[in-house]
Amino acid sequence: MRVIFFGTPEFAVPSLTALVEAGYQVAAVVTQPDMPSGRGRRLMPPPVKSWAQKLGLRVIQPAGIRDAAFIAEIKSASPDVIITAAYGRILPREILNLPPNGCVNVHASLLPKYRGASPVNAAITNGDKVTGITTMLMDEGMDTGDILLQQETEIFHDDTAGSLSKRLSVAGAALMILTLRQMEKGSLKRKPQEGEASFAPLLKKSDGNIRWERPAQELYDFIRGMNPWPGAYTYFEGSVLKILRSEVAGGKGEAGIVALAGRHELVVGTGAGLLSILEVQPQGKRLMAISDFLQGRHIEKGTRFHDKQF
């Protein structure tokens, strides 16, 4: 089968690799434009572009997904099927209707749960124990198309959005290949999405702001779900302090107030219970264990963390 692949972040790389290794003819790889990154704001290619170039594949980076010239270019490639994995934009009808076998999306949730751009973050933040991968036949809605195949994945207690996304990306690649194999055999069945839908919109940096009035267990899940992007953060001594890792501690405390501070531990009160901070990243500095952060600092019991800068 002749395939055109749409994808942008690291999550999509295993799916592209699997297509090539399975012997499919990848006519083109479509990805988002290079974006400025870092302090120098230097243009950086998305991970899928870098990998596609290493594989010697043709890369297309349209500025506009509805651009007539781009659609004509996709049409001229004559794909049998289009595969998408975290591309980042909804495909217009003109592209959806091009391949005879349709457009198949690899989505990191058990649809209809967590439609949208941040399903992995949402699953961890909400304290879910199970999530999964769905391959679906795309339509013009936001992850509303018919389900093709699904596979469950356990969420471990210490998973972050980063670690879970990595596992799901590998599982998604395998499920995508299985979907194509069944499509070729004519045994693939589609079914409408059933049950109540939920949504996981694109995250902004401000979404990582820690609200200390929430219970400790919720904050533990929130910190994991925001790691690595956008990063859970609070304000301490007038600057941003990212919290990368924590654990729920026994006892009671006042929300946002340091309940215990020593040479190797920092425990903060929440809306219900205590939260022990294990790993942080001060503004403009490296990620560090809490014991390293506390060296040379005298943080007293009763010190307050804030959800806004004063």
Image: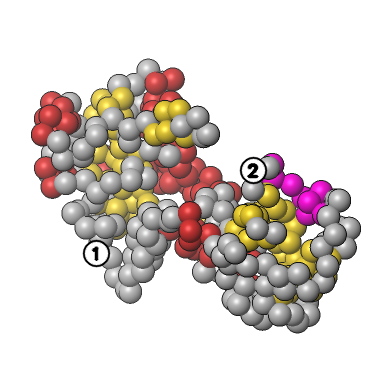
Residue 178 located left or right of residue 222:
left
Q: Residue 259: in sight, yes or no?
A: yes
**Helix, strand or loop at mark 2:** loop
- Type of colouring: secondary structure
Q: Nearer the viewer, residue 187 or 89?
A: 89
Which class describes the residues within 10 Å of circle 1: few (<14), some (14-19), or many (20+)?
few
Q: Amino acid at mark 1?
A: Pro
Q: Position of residue 306 (x, y in %)?
A: 63, 67
Corner quadrant of residue 49? top left
The residue lying furthest to the right in this view is 263
Residue to which mark 1 is pinned? 192
**Residue at 60% over, 64% down:** 310
Residue 158 located left or right of residue 104:
right
Residue to which mark 2 is pinned? 284
Q: Position of residue 252 (x, y in %)?
A: 75, 81
**Helix, strand or loop at mark 1:** loop
**Residue at 35% over, 38% down:** 7
| Marks 1/2: CA–CA distance | 48 Å
Corner quadrant of residue 226? bottom right
Q: Is 293 in the magenta?
A: yes
Q: Nearer the viewer, mark 1 or mark 2?
A: 2
Q: Is 62 in the magenta?
A: no
Relative to 3, residue 234 above or below: below
Location of the N terminus by quadrant is top left
Relative to 201, residue 12 above or below: above
**Residue at 68% over, 49% down:** 282
**Residue at 24% over, 32% down:** 62
Residue interval drawn in magenta:
286-294
